[in-house]
Amino acid sequence: MPRSPESVTPVSTGLDHIFPPWLRLDDLDPVGPLWRAAQIFRLASFGYALGFQIVVNHDLDRPGLTWALFGLLTVANIWWAAGYLVGFGRRWWFVASEVAVSAVMMLSTSYVADMAWVANNQTWPTTLWMTNCVLSSALLGGPWWGLLGGAAVGLTNFYVKGEIVLNFGRNATALLLLMTGMAIGLAASRARVTHERLTTAIRAAAQAAERERLAREVHDGVLQVLALVSRRGTEIGGETAQLAGLAAQQEQRLRRLIAARPADGGSDTQTDLGAALQALAADGVSVSAPPDPVPLPATVLAEVMSAIDNILTNSALHAGPEAHSYVLLEDLDEEVIISVRDTGLGIAPGRLAQARSEGRMGIDRSIVGRIEHLGGRAQLHSAPGMGTEWELTIPVEKGRRR
C-alpha cells in the first residue's frame, strides 16, 4: 500500500555510505537498503558474467551475436539498476520485464552455442547473473514471489539443458535459486513489518507527548478557570449557581477527557465502548450499557465519545435546569446504536436551520460530521416541550470479538 512521506521513517544501513546522499536520504521504502544491496550484487554478478563471456566466447557458434546480446544485456542491466536504486522500478511491470528478458537471454543459449557446449557449461549469461531477477521478485513481492521467480529461472534452465535434474547432490542450481528467492523474500517482508511497527511506535510516542503537553496547558488554564467559576458561582448563589453547576460539570468532563489514554498498540486497539459510556454517569446523566464488553477500535471510540460529549454539553446548556439525560447502548453485532435522550425543553422548529444560516455549524460538524465520517448515521428527534433524542448508529466489523 502506498504510504505518504509523513507516515514512514527513512531507512538506512551501513552500506548506504556507498551511495550518494540524495539517493539514501530520500528513500522511505523500508526495503530500500535491501534494494541497494541487491544492486551491489548485480554489479558483482555482471562482472562475473563479463569474465565468463570473455573466456567462453571463442567456444560459441555465434560469438559476434553473443557480444551483441551481451551489449543489450549491459544496457538493460544499467536500466534495471537505476530503476531499483532510484525507486521508480520497484513496480510489478518493471520486475516482470527483468524476468522476461532474463528468460529470453537464457533461451538464446541454444542458439549461440551447440548442444555439447550447453550440456557441459552453465546457461548463458551465467546462473549467477540470472539470480538478479529472483532477488528483484523476492524484494518486491515477498517469499512466495521470490519462490516463483526462482522457479521460473530454474525451469528455464531445465528447458535449455533439455533435462530436469532433481539430483541436487550433482546439481543444486534450481534448489539454490528457490531457497534464495524465499530467504530474501522473508527478509523483505520482515523489514516491512518491523518498519511499520517502528513507525507506529514513533507516531504513538509523538501523540502521547502532544497529549501530555495539551493536558498541562488545559490544566493550568481552562480547568483552573472552570474551577474558579464553579466555586465563586456557588458562593454567590441565585442564578449564578446554575452557571456554577454547568462549569463544574464541564470541568469534570474535561478532566475525564485528559485522564483518558488510548491503549498501547495504535489505532487498531479494541476499547470497550460500554465502559467509556459508564464513565459519563453523573448527576443528571444516567447510562445503560450491556454487561458484556462492546469493543471498538480506539480511534473510532474517540470520535464517538466526542460526539456524545457534545450532545450532553448541549443538553446541559439548553435543555433547562431540571432536565435529565439518558444514554442507552445497544450492541447489534454488526452495528452499535447509542441513544442519548434528555427530558428538557426540546428544540423549536426551524431553530437548527436558523443556526446553520448564521454560520453556527456545531451540530453538523461536532456530531453529525463525526458519525458520518465513521460510516454511520446520526438522527435527531425533538419537539418543543418533548425533550431531544439523538440516535447514533455506528457500523462495526462483524465478529470483532476475539
Image (spheres, rainbow, N blue to C red):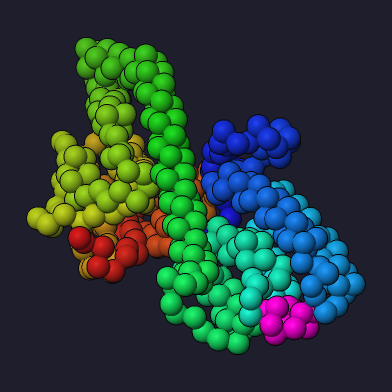
* The furthest residue to the bottom: 162
In this picture, which residue range is highlighted in magenta? 108-118
Residue 232 visible in the current orientation: yes
Residue 40, position as x, y percentages in the image:
66, 47
In this picture, is 118 found above or below 290? below
In this picture, is 49 found above or below 171? above
Q: Is residue 310 left or right of residue 131?
A: left
Residue 53, position as x, y percentages in the image:
77, 63
Q: Residue at x 32, y 63 (%)?
A: 396
Residue 156 visible in the current orientation: no
Q: Is residue 117 magenta?
A: yes
Q: Give the main secondary structure of the magenta stretch.
A: helix
- Quadrant where the image shows the N terminus: bottom right
- Quadrant where the image shows the C terminus: bottom left
Q: Is residue 110 magenta?
A: yes
In this picture, is 250 found above or below 42? above
Q: Residue at x 49, y 61 (%)?
A: 180
In this picture, is 395 found above or below 363? below
Front in this rendered view, residue 324 or 202: 202
Q: How many marks?
A: 0
Q: Residue at x 45, y 64 (%)?
A: 179
Front in this rendered view, residue 356 or 52: 52
